[in-house]
Amino acid sequence: MIVATAGHIDHGKTTLVRTLTGIDTDRLPEEKARGISIDVGFAHCTLANGQTIGFVDVPGHERFVRNMLSGVYAVGHVLLVIAADDGIMPQTREHLHIVNLLGVAHGTVVITKKDRVDAARLAQVELDVVDLLRGTAWNSASVIAVSALTGEGMDALRKRLAAAAATEHGAAEDMGVLARFVVDRVFTAAGSGTIVTGTVIAGSIGVGDMLVITPAGIQVRVRKLQRHGSATERAHAGERCAINLANVEQANVSRGDWLVAAEAHHPTDRLDVHLKVLISEVGLLKHWTPVHVHIGAADIPARLTMRRGASVAPGEGAFAQLRLQRSINAAHGDRLILRDQSSTRTVGGGVVIDPFPPERRSAQRLAVLAALDAYDLRASLQALIVLLPQGIELEWLARVFNLQFDKILDLVPTDAVVLKTGLHTILSGEQVLQLQRTVVERLDRFHAEYKNATGMELVQLNAEIARELPMKVFVALVKLCAGRAGLQLHGSQVSIASHDSTDNPRDLVVWQRIRPMLHDAKASIPSVRELSVLSRVPLQQLRDLMHRKSGTGKLVKLTLERFALPETMEMLRQKAEQTAASCSDQLFSAAQYRDVIGTGRGLAIEILECLDKKGETLRRGDLRAIRINTGE
């Protein structure tokens, strides 16, 4: 379990940690000289049951809230420290607001310096604490009074920490969650090089792993790992550790950076969030308000954006977008704190809903954010399928939730359809069936109106019946429906497979005239121009017919100017097999094939290239082989 301190300056946080662990967390010369904590400090102790607890001691001065925020991020338990003589002070309240906004629901209130007050004063402070916690997630938190000087109450605190540690399970480490580590300290050690400390937020990190410093994009290798001062091979989600990095200088990594798996390196400078304004704020939080965003260990200036005229009142929550001055790493569920422009007070906080929002907000955007805010990915996916008729890109969803792509695929409902469009787009099964019916109905009308047209342009069909679908998704959908609905795609067009644009009196007359000529020609396939002369059919009319006829499968297109009957192509395929069989190594040249079929070299090459495209032959340099059909 990782325990962080919180509370006002000079209330005894560092002394408390030193009494529990024997470790002084004030390491800086300035801290020693001034007697106050300036930066976060770290310690650990082993309980009687053998369990180890890590401590993060944070500064209490209001000037160092930025450092305090980097220390309390992603801890499992917080000790809210209140001195009995001073009682509740400004940073007591602000620190409590912060840990509540960060979602730290488990904590203990420790009243220190018990030896300095009488029983009446102690009782009054305990009553004040009850009022302070009322209405927060800490409403039922334990309150323990101690004296680090005399040791009174320390055993009770140790027992409380042991009980909390016994129920601590750390962050979930589901299979498929990508590794993310927030960096809160960087230094060098002689003989080791660059070392970073921080917390594994998701997944796990092991010695030898290749990671990326984000947002910089620098690839590094984990050389060594330490947890609580001892070497370890792997650190898991929810654990603090020190990582010795290879391939990077200290200057290239700093507090606020993240170490992530390569697949999780997706820097972003815009976040769609669900924010909440503290009830203690005196005014509305409005569109374009400048703020400081604290996320992980980073402090980034940003602007809050909402619909024009919208605002959030004290104590209220709303969806909004943060536009950051620099890129960060973020994932769905990350907690953040908002402080004012001068960074002097905490105004609210929130949780990241979508770290990769679209540039333009559609009318349905709020509904999409509400679906993502479900905190149940399967439920979110079901809701999004209904909300987004244009489909959901699963790669985007995997990035949002920091998951390997296969994990997202496992969550796709059985009645949904996944289209491969370069990316993977998911549509509901019902939507696919409805679009399939609409496509068939529109094509039926098109063929009735334009009998001689080979098919309808896909761009036109998309614009008429499914404008909300991106073109690449629509084409993938039509391809999927082709077999089910009897559709045929040819180039940029689609038609009902049974439609024959040549089934009309004029074309039938020409076809009856030229088909016998193509049949009798056998391997000496005439060009369209030669066939036009022989049949006395105008060249353009004949060329148009033969291209349309090839769309019906009754002609095979060798080139733009030469077409053959299917039975002729089958005969020519068999001739290729015979040619290969006559060669000892089963490889034959175009010249050998020409001699077998009895044509010129140019025509023989055109035929072989057509057989190549059909997958019947395989070119190997200047020779060819018969492609063996494995049935796969």
Image (cartoon, rainbow, N blue to C red):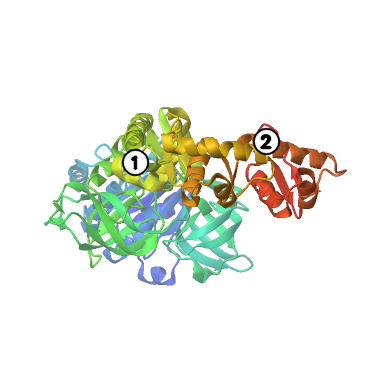
Residue 572 position, x and y percent, is 70, 40
Amino acid type indicated by mark 2: Glu
Left or right, 623 with respect to 432, comes to right
Residue that extends furthest to the right in the rendered view of this protein: 584
Residue 224 position, x and y percent, is 61, 56
Element under disc 1: loop
Question: Relative to the observer, which residue lies in front, 277 or 528?
Answer: 528
Sequence-earlier tag: 1 or 2: 1
Residue that label 2 marks: 570
Left or right, 535 with respect to 393, comes to right
State how far apart marks 1 and 2 are (Cα): 77 Å
Residue 310 position, x and y percent, is 14, 53
Closer to viewer: mark 1 or mark 2: 2
**Quadrant of the frame with the N terminus:** top left
- Mark 1 neighbour class, 10 Å CA radius: few under 14, some 14 to 19, many 20 or more: many
Is residue 138 shown above or below 23?
Answer: above
Q: Do the residues labelled 1 and 2 touch (CB within 8 Å)?
A: no
Residue that label 1 marks: 106
Q: Residue at x 53, y 54 (%)?
A: 262
Q: Residue at x 71, y 43 (%)?
A: 617
Q: Tag count in the figure? A: 2
Element under disc 2: helix
Question: Relative to the observer, which residue lies in front, 335 or 363?
Answer: 363
Numbered circle sitting on residue 272: none
